[in-house]
Each structure stands twice: as C-alpha cells, then as structure tokens.
C-alpha cells in the first residue's frame, strides 16, 4: 500500500503549481500516516509528509527561455513551466515588429531576430498567481538580455 501511495504522490504532485511556487520534483516521502476511512464513502485518506525541490520565480530574476508565440503586441516565452509575456514596450528600441515577415518576428534587420523557437534571456518584471498556475511579465530591454 505504501508503494502505491508513493507512486500516487509522485504522479499527482510533481510538476504542479499551487499558485505561489512550482513543485519540480518530489525527493522522498518522509512520513505516511495510517489511513482514515471516510464515513459514508468508499475511500480512505492518508496524510503524507514529503521533501521536494520547489521553484518560486521572483521579480528581478533573470531566466533563459524559449519563445513560444509572437504577435504585434509582444511575445510569449516558456521558462520551464512558467509562461512569460514580453510586451513590445519591453523590447529594445532598435528591435521592431516586422508585419511582412514569415514567420512573425521582431527584428532589427541586422543580427537580432525574435521568432518562435528563439532562445532569450528574460528579466522577470512581475508575477501573477491564479489557482494552480502562475504567469509573469518580462523584459529584454536591459544590457545582456535578449
């Protein structure tokens, strides 16, 4: 039974977000309580204590991400499980939206091209939490970003 509970813990908890942090990896369950039968239902409840590797993105953190979509308002990048939106106002002034490009992209017509699949270094400007998910606003307007 304990092996089943361990596997269920890994399956249900790893890779989830509680709204303020992501649970990256469950390292090991440290304590599994005795089961308690729920009256009137055909199930039991267990309390499991465990150690885990967690990640909480914070304002000012610089992260590497991959661009997932681009439009004239800005672009979205995936930084692990976190989705980061970078507004066109948070892109350097020499990098502009090119409406005639295929695929859609931001470019400075020399060496900088931001399109789907591009790797970028993004600074987190703020985060927003919902139930079970997090979103962030980012910038590439400073030195050594982009």
Image (cartoon, helix red, strand yellow):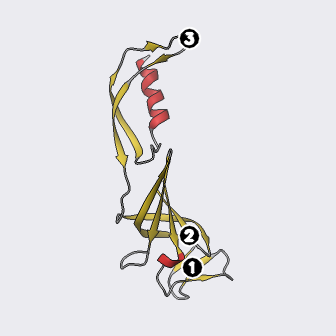
Please tell me in which quadrant of the rendered image residue 29 appears: top left
12, above or below 40, in the image: below
Residue that label 3 marks: 40
Relative depth, front residue between 83 and 4 = 83
Label 2 secondary element:
strand
Image x and y of residue 109, in percent? 56, 88
Q: Confirm or deny contact between disc 1 and disc 2 (CB under 8 A).
A: yes
Mark 1 or mark 3: whose residue is earlier in sequence? 3
Whole-angstrom CA distance, mark 1 to mark 2, is 9 Å
Give the mark nearer the N terminus: 3 vs 2: 3
Between 139 and 129, the residue placed more toward the observer is 129
- Residue 123 image-quadrant placement: bottom left
Above-or-below relation of 75 to 136: below
Q: Position of residue 101 (x, y in %)?
A: 66, 80
Q: Nearer the viewer, mark 3 or mark 2?
A: 3
The kind of secondary structure element at disc 1 is: strand
Name the residue tied to disc 1: 106
Quickly name the residue at label 2. 75
The residue shown at (57%, 73%) is 115
Looking at the rendered image, the quarter that the C terminus falls into is bottom left
Q: Residue at coordinates 47% horizontally, 42% vertically from top-left?
A: 16
Q: Position of residue 141 (x, y in %)?
A: 42, 78
Side of 49 relative to 132 (left or right): left
């Amino acid at each position: 039974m304990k092996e089943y509970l361990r596997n269920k813990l890994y399956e249900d908890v790893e890779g989830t977000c509680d709204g303020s942090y992501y649970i990256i990896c469950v390292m090991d369950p440290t304590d599994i309580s005795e089961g308690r039968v729920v009256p009137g239902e055909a199930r039991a409840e267990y309390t499991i204590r465990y150690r885990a590797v967690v990640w909480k993105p914070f304002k000012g953190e610089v992260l590497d991400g991959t661009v997932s979509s681009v439009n004239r308002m800005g672009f979205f990048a995936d930084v692990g499980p976190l989705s980061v939106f970078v507004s066109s106002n948070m892109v350097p002034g020499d990098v502009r939206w090119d409406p005639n490009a295929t695929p859609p992209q931001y470019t400075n017509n020399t060496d900088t091209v931001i399109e789907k699949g591009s790797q970028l270094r993004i600074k987190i400007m703020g985060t927003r939490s919902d139930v079970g998910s997090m979103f962030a606003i980012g910038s590439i307007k400073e030195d050594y970003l982009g």
